[in-house]
Each structure stands twice: as C-alpha cells, then as structure tokens.
Amino acid sequence: MEMSVKLSHPSSCLLLFFLLFSEHHSAAGTSIPVMANAAARMFNRARKAKQAREFLNAHNVARESSGVPPLRWDKGLARFADKWARQRKSDCSMQHSGGPYGENIFWYREKKTWWPERVVMKWFEERFNYDSKTNTCASGEMCGHYTQIVWRDTSAIGCARVKCDEGRGFLVVCEYDPRGNYEGESPFDQTQ
C-alpha cells in the first residue's frame, strides 16, 4: 500500500516533524522536543511577520485610496499593542490603553472569518460616516477608527492580535504614531 502526504503548509510540516520525532533523541544526544520547540518558535515568528505585513498592507491600501502617504511597520508599536492586548486577554474588553499613541481596537468571536485585511476594512468603512466638509461623524455613528487610519501626519503602525481566555474571542489592537484625531483638526490637514 502506497501512502501519499501533501505538505503544502508550514504547519503541516511541523506536525509531521512532531509525529516522527517526538520523544526520540538524536545521535548527538540532543532532545528532539528541544528542537521541536525551536521550530515552533520559528513558525510563530513567521506567522507574526505575515500578520504584520497583512495589517500594514491593508492600512496602506486604505491610505492610498484616501490620498495620504503610506505607513511603515514599527516593532516598538507592535510590542506596545501586544502588551496591551495581553492585559485584556482575561476579559477581552475593548478598553483603550490611554498610552501615548493613537489606537484602534477591534473584537471578534470567530477567527476563521476575520483576518487583518477584513479588520482594517471594517474600520475603513467608517468613511461613509465621516463628513469632510464639517469634519464630523454622522449623528450617532462612529468614524474615529477611519480618521485615525488616514490621519495624514501618522507615519508608523504596529498591531497585535490575541486570543482571549475562556472562548471570549479575539482582540486586535493597532497603535499609530504620531497619534491622530485631534479635536477640531481634519485628518487630511498637514501640521506645519
């Protein structure tokens, strides 16, 4: 009997590695679980890098369509976002950190239906609630996530996503520097 295995995703390669080598030792005496942990860390770093690219690209597509300059990814902002998101892991509460950056927060329950591009697009859809002539949101509607995304002077972003405890869903936090949403200022005005 011939068996065929398709390893099209890095996680399937990692799973195969675990199945083949769990609890065995190499000829040099190195524990395979130690190597497996290193492989898992490497896979996690690759996953986070992909997620970072997706968040950044989605923001820059939104900004380009609004005529403002692109953002760059900032690891310090991403660490700040991750630290705050982890503090909210137990309750998955959409509370702002009160930190020195602009901040957008998003909560969702099902991982399979929300990915970075869709989260950013949900914030960007608030553009329909924003009146550029009066620089205000439509009555009873939100538009601050949108205005933060397209704030002209913002130049850097960092985002994080955490899985909340006890099946409470997922929390996304994005940090923006310099922050936007200053009272009385339009997101499209340039600071001199």
Image (spheres, rainbow, N blue to C red):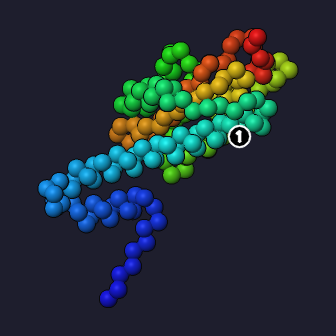
User: Could you tell me the amino acid type at mark 1?
Assistant: Val
In this view, which residue lies farthest toward the right?
133
The answer to which of 92 and 41 lies nearer the viewer is 41
Q: In the image, is 101 to the left or to the right of 46?
A: right
- Quarter occupied by residue 156: top right
Res. 48 in view: yes
Res. 143 in view: no
Residue at the location (36% across, 31% down)? 90
Residue 33, position as x, y percentages in the image: 22, 53
Residue 152, position as x, y percentages in the image: 73, 23
Q: Quadrant of the N terminus?
A: bottom left
The answer to which of 84 and 166 lies nearer the viewer is 84
Is residue 39 depicted above or below 127 in this figure? Answer: below
- Quarter occupied by residue 79: top left
- Quarter occupied by residue 28: bottom left
In this view, which residue lies farthest toward the front?
28
Callout 1 crowding tier (Cα within 10 Å): few <14, some 14–19, many ≥20: some
Residue at the location (35% across, 39% down)? 166
Q: Secondary structure at mark 1?
A: helix
Q: In the image, is 36 to the left or to the right of 6?
A: left
Residue at the location (43% across, 37% down)? 162
The answer to which of 160 and 79 lies nearer the viewer is 79
Residue at the location (15% across, 62% down)? 27
Count of number-bearing discs: 1
Residue picked out by circle 1: 61
Is residue 100 depicted above or below 110 in this figure? Answer: above
Q: Quadrant of the C terminus?
A: top right
Residue 135, position as x, y percentages in the image: 79, 18
In this view, which residue lies farthest toward the left?
29
Residue 63, position as x, y percentages in the image: 72, 34
